[in-house]
């Protein structure tokens, strides 16, 4: 029976609710009381037009897990017609009946299903009253149940309107706060960390991450997260088109995942379980229609991202992308000023090498002397070239080795020599000073391997190996050509190239050895890696 007390209980459900799930649970319990039914299930339409179980007095463990797609179940029939449906007995035998998986033995024999009508007259969900025995509803009980459902629909609409109004104001304030803070920072790393910290705080998200696009590798690399778990901070890079983040970059639009635990395309289900992640929205960071990264936001419970929430995050992502690019330009401008200073230092280093070369009288001709000068100048030039194309203040040692080997192959190996080059190992990143010094060292060692290792041998191999271990960088240049003389003593050698190597390795604070190993001549350089300047 629907009376004043029933109406009071329904309205009290609204006043007590902290969120929509709480409200729906209270409404289901209030509608069940004195209704004559044994169970009440409340299903609401989601963004994909599926019906999702949002409250249940019988099977609360299925809430947010049970979904009915378009055309599935008796509830969809009610959504389509907008009219109540009554099944007095044999509900499970109806052709359109869709039971709960794993809920065998709990099904209702009789059903009364009512639509929840929106302000526009379109159903936005259904209420299903159930009974395990036959249940014939007379007109008066039907009207009572209809009144309960109509009042519940109004309460849900009112709650959503108030929530949307309040959260829109909150999100505008949050958007303003985050945008203002990140636009004041001149440093990329600080912008990224502020972005994830403030977005998570202001929008009440469980985890936020930023991945930036590495265009050379076509990968999205994790650059910032406010998640404290070490496993999360070490998440691997994602290829373009892979997982959700990779698709966002390719498609250039936000993608929402209702539950990452059941999404096949999502990478990292185990970590999502460990961190308690459920719903996700991934937004591209774009500037002038060019994607530079993605912002991913996770909730700890199933969450519906409203249109105004998505718009706020899109605006924030665009602001962040502009701030990131602005910071990069500031850094590049500062480094360009520093580059002038570094070029001057490099020219002074070339002048010092020329003075040393002038004092050395072993050259047989002017052409040979000039070729040596040229190779050393090109070694320094390769560092400057890589610096302009790589990470502004760091140069990869593997990249330097590749550039020098290509130059030596093209200009120094004689046509009658068949020498194979291999470069292997890690692309250890060095600061400008160390990169320039080791480039000169590598140049001398490769030159020495070509000229002296193959003075009589006509074919063989030259290997360059790079590695880093515990902050120490190791470089090996090995050749399979002529072996060292039995009485070779590097301390007594008057070779200019070896003198230059020894001098530069000392400046690096490292060690240099040259010895015979199983018939290969192996030059070994080890030095401590220093941080950026």
Image: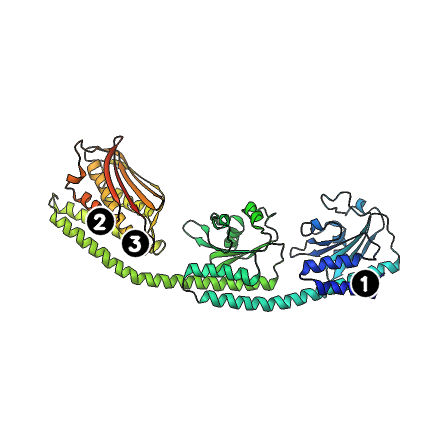
Label 1 sits on a secondary structure element that is helix
Quadrant of the image for the C terminus? bottom left
- Residue located beneath label 2 in the image: 376
Q: Looking at the image, which residue is at 68% across and 58% down?
A: 21
Q: CA distance from mark 1 to mark 2?
A: 91 Å
Answer yes or no: is residue 73 visible.
yes
163 or 70, which lies in front?
Answer: 163
Disc number lying in front (1 or 2) = 1
Is there a contact, CB below 8 Å, between mark 3 and mark 1?
A: no
Answer yes or no: is residue 289 visible.
no
> Which of marks 1 and 3 precedes in the sequence?
1
Q: Which mark is residue 432?
A: 3
Q: CA distance from mark 3 to mark 1?
A: 77 Å
> Which of marks 2 and 1 precedes in the sequence?
1
Measured from the top left, where is residue 3 in percent x and y? 84, 64
**Number of residues whose C-alpha sits closer than 10 Å to that of mark 3, classed few (under 14), some (14–19) or many (20 or more):** many
Q: Is 321 on the left-hand or right-hand side of 382?
A: right
**Number of residues whose C-alpha sits closer than 10 Å to that of mark 1, classed few (under 14), some (14–19) or many (20 or more):** some
Q: CA distance from mark 3 to mark 2?
A: 16 Å
Measured from the top left, where is residue 131 in percent x and y? 82, 50
- Residue located beneath label 1 in the image: 6
Label 2 sits on a secondary structure element that is helix
Is there a contact, CB below 8 Å, between mark 3 and mark 2?
A: no
Q: Is 45 on the left-hand or right-hand side of 446?
A: right
Q: Is 331 on the left-hand or right-hand side of 272?
A: left
The image quadrant that residue 154 belongs to is: bottom right
484 or 383, which lies in front?
Answer: 484
Q: Looking at the image, which residue is at 40% across and 50% down?
A: 216
Label 3 sits on a secondary structure element that is helix
**Number of residues whose C-alpha sits closer than 10 Å to that of mark 2, classed few (under 14), some (14–19) or many (20 or more):** many
């Amino acid at each position: 029976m629907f009376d004043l007390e029933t109406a009071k209980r329904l309205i009290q459900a609204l006043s007590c609710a902290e969120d929509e799930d709480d409200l729906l649970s209270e409404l289901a319990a209030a509608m069940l009381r004195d209704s004559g039914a044994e169970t009440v299930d409340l299903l609401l339409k989601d963004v994909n037009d599926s019906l999702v179980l949002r409250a249940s007095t019988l099977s609360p463990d299925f809430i947010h897990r049970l979904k009915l797609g378009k055309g599935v179940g008796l509830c969809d029939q009610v959504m389509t017609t907008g009219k109540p449906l009554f099944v007095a007995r044999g509900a499970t035998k109806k052709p359109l009946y869709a039971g709960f998986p794993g809920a065998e033995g709990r099904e209702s024999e009789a059903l009364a299903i009512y639509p929840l009508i929106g302000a526009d007259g379109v159903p936005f969900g259904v209420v299903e009253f159930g009974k395990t025995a036959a249940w014939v509803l007379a007109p008066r009980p039907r009207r009572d149940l209809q009144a309960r459902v109509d009042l519940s629909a109004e309460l849900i609409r009112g709650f959503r309107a108030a929530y949307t109004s309040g959260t829109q104001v909150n999100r505008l304030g949050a958007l303003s706060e985050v945008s203002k803070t990140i636009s004041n920072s001149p440093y990329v790393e600080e912008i990224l960390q502020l972005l994830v910290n403030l977005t998570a705080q202001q929008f009440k998200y469980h985890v936020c991450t930023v991945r930036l696009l590495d265009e050379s590798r076509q990968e999205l690399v994790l650059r910032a997260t406010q998640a404290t778990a070490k496993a999360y901070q070490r998440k691997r890079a994602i290829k373009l088109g892979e997982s959700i983040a990779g698709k966002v970059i390719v498609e250039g639009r936000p993608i929402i995942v209702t539950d990452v635990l059941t999404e096949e395309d999502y990478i990292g289900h185990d970590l999502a379980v460990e961190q308690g992640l459920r719903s996700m929205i991934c937004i591209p960071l774009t500037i002038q229609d060019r994607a530079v990264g993605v912002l991913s936001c996770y909730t700890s419970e199933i969450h519906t991202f409203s249109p105004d929430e998505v718009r706020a995050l899109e605006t924030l992502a665009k602001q962040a992308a502009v701030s990131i690019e602005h910071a990069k330009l500031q850094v590049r401008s500062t480094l360009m000023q520093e580059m002038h200073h570094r070029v001057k230092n490099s020219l002074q280093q070339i002048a010092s090498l020329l003075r040393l070369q002038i004092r050395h009288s072993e050259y047989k001709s002017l052409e040979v002397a000039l070729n040596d000068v040229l190779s050393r100048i090109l070694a320094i030039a390769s560092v400057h070239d890589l610096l302009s194309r790589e990470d502004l203040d760091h140069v990869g040692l593997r990249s330097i080795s590749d550039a020098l080997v290509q130059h030596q192959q093209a200009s120094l190996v004689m046509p009658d020599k068949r020498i194979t080059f291999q470069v292997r190992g890690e692309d250890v990143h060095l600061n400008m000073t160390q990169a320039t010094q080791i480039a000169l060292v590598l140049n001398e060692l490769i030159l020495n391997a070509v000229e002296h290792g193959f003075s009589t041998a006509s074919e063989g191999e030259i290997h360059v190996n790079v590695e880093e271990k515990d902050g120490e960088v190791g470089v090996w240049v090995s050749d399979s050509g002529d072996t060292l003389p039995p009485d070779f003593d590097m301390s007594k050698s008057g070779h200019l190239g070896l003198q230059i190597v020894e001098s530069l390795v000392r400046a690096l604070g490292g060690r240099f050895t040259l010895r015979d190993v199983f018939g290969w001549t192996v030059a070994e350089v080890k030095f401590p890696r220093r941080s950026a300047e």
